Amino acid sequence: MSVHETKSGKFEVRWREGRRNRSKTFAREADARRFEHEVRRELEHGRPVLLRGDVPTLGDFAQEWMEGRQLRGDVSTNTTLFDAALLDRHIDPFIGHLPLLDLTPQRLDAWQRAALRVGTPYMVQRASQLLARMLDVAVRMGYLQGNPARSLEHVKHRHAEGVALAPVQVERLRGWFLERDRIGDATLISVMAYAGPRPEEALAMRWQNLRGRRFLIEEKNVDGVLVVKHPSDKKRGPRWVELPEAVVADLAEWRLALGRPAGLVFPKPNGLPWSRSDRGNWRRRWLSKAAAAIGEPTLTPRDLRHTCASLLAAVNTPRVEIEAQLGHRADTSERIYQHLIEELRGTRLNFDQLVRQARADVLGEPDVRRTFGNRAG
């Protein structure tokens, strides 16, 4: 290993690594001597000397890392799509072009501030967590000596406040659809509000998984593709959900209207699963109008899951049963999904009685329904 002055007046550090002769040129001798010391230290510890051309850019490394995760089946399709969106919107436009060696704590701190100017705190924090996981792998592969993303500040954020409907509001929402002969939509509302599946789970339900008052949730709809939920995923794996008697009746009537099919519970008119655009169109064209009609213009499909969690809590359902029903931890339910429904404060009714009473108040007895032949959506 040596430092030589070149004919151009620059200083070149030369060293041998394995069978390769390597070199790097500096304008100042002090910089060359400093680099020579770093090279000696790396070689003494048996580590490769990484130059700028030896390491990929963050964008290239991220793509390779995500492809590897997908091939190994480490994450679900939904997670892959979400992480890809984080990369495309919050990471790659700012620092994706930089080599991994240039990702210093100062540079990443500047990235986080820039990302916060155009993105929400929640998404930037998720992007920071994703970046830290990626760079952990870069450290393991020898591209970096340490993970600079681990020193990033935590971005404080609040979960968006969900909306929890009282049973009477759910029935008014259903009634809006029933008045327009959309029994499929009304049944979908009933299932999500009273049984609590995620929207992507409700749109992947099959009739064959209905067992009396229980339904097996084992698939999810990812942009029109049904994906089997991974059995090892305790949080989002397959689970049985209990159906209130009113939901069982709604499903029975909906199946009769469809002609007793054996496929999806909520298909498109052509029998195929809903795509992402189908869900967006249904929300804009139908749910938003129905929600505005009952005085809840900000209602989203996932808010119906908040409704189910809040109703279960209102009738004093044990925490472990709420956890099993919704497929997430009880503390997550209490922190995010459960809200106080003022109308139900101190209620002594059980779940079935709450729904039955709400239907009597809104729809009257007998239930105001007709024979319908349309499909949800």
Image (cartoon, rainbow, N blue to C red):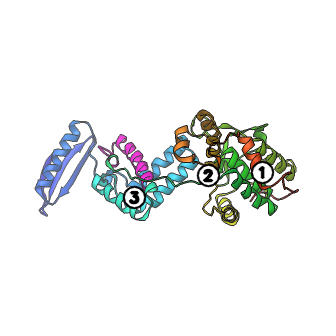
What residue did someone put label 2 on?
Answer: 164
- Give yes or no for residue 127 being in the magenta stretch: yes
Q: Nearer the viewer, residue 296 or 1?
A: 296
Type of the residue with mark 3: Gly
Q: Position of residue 117 (x, y in %)?
A: 39, 64
What residue did someone put label 1 on?
Answer: 359
Q: Magenta region: which residues? A: 124-149
- Give yes or no for residue 85 being in the magenta stretch: no
Label 3: how many Cα within 10 Å (few below 14, some 14–19, many 20+): some
Q: Is residue 251 visible?
A: yes
Q: Is residue 329 visible?
A: no
Is 178 left, or right, of 119 in this rendering? right
| Quarter occupied by the N terminus | top left
Q: Nearer the viewer, residue 339 or 160?
A: 339
Task: Residue 242: name its quadrant.
Answer: top right
Labels 2 and 3: the sequence-earlier one: 3
